[in-house]
Image (tube, grey):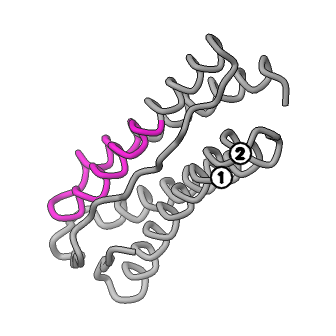
Amino acid sequence: MNTPSLLDAIRIVKENERLAAETYSKAAQKTHIPGKELFIQLSEFEKFHYEKLTALEKSLEESGKFINYEGKALILPPKLEIKFAEEPEHKSLMEIITEAKKIEKVAEKTYADLADQLDDPEGHAMFAKLSEEEHMHYVILSDAFWSLNQSTTWVYKRP
């Protein structure tokens, strides 16, 4: 992939990360404790991705070099249970989770596609790691959706 189209792609995924962070921040405002914490953590995670993509963009513009991407761990409590009774707007919570799953799936695929297009080992590794992180977010949200659907209790455990 040549640098101008790579920079264009980075600018697009940066905007996606900004929107995802904003979406999770709004979800945290609509959700009560303890479910709020998951959305806060996801928002912070997407902001981290945005910052790293900004650093990558700058590095590519200035030197044409990829940056090392160390990844980030999602810090959640060991276990969390939220009963629908604690979450009065559980319908909107299901809608929030459904939308969040879509965001994560698109991000996962976009990063995987970018990784596949890069010959540079560091660039490939960075986008592959970003894809893996988005996949983990998708799994956490899928588990939340499934547990809410099956038992009216949102249970998630640290992966």
**Residue with the mark numbered 1:** 128
**Residue contact at pointers 1 and 2, CB within 8 angstroms:** yes
**Residue with the mark numbered 2:** 124
Q: Residue 41 at x, y = what percent?
A: 30, 52
Q: What stretch is highlighted in magenta?
A: 22-49
Q: Residue 22 at x, y = what percent?
A: 38, 36
Q: Residue 112 at x, y = what percent?
A: 71, 51
> Camera-side residue: 110 or 61?
61
Q: Answer yes or no: is residue 146 visible.
A: yes
> Which residue is drawn at the image coordinates 61% and 48% (left, top)?
107
Q: Answer yes or no: is residue 18 visible.
A: no
Q: Is residue 131 left or right of residue 72?
A: right
Mark 1 neighbour density, 10 Å: few (under 14) some (14–19) many (20 or more): many
- Rendered position, 69 above or below 131: above
The quarter of the picture where the C terminus appears is bottom left
The quarter of the picture where the N terminus appears is top right
Classify mark 1: helix, strand or loop: helix
What mark, if any, has residue 97 been given in the picture? none
32 is within the stretch colored magenta: yes
> Which residue is drawn at the image coordinates 40% and 38% (left, top)?
48
Mark 2 neighbour density, 10 Å: few (under 14) some (14–19) many (20 or more): many
Q: Is residue 15 left or right of residue 125?
A: left
Main SS of residues in magenta: helix
Residue type, numbered disc 2: His
Which quadrant of the structure image shows residue 68?
top right
> Which residue is drawn at the image coordinates 33% and 43% (left, top)?
44
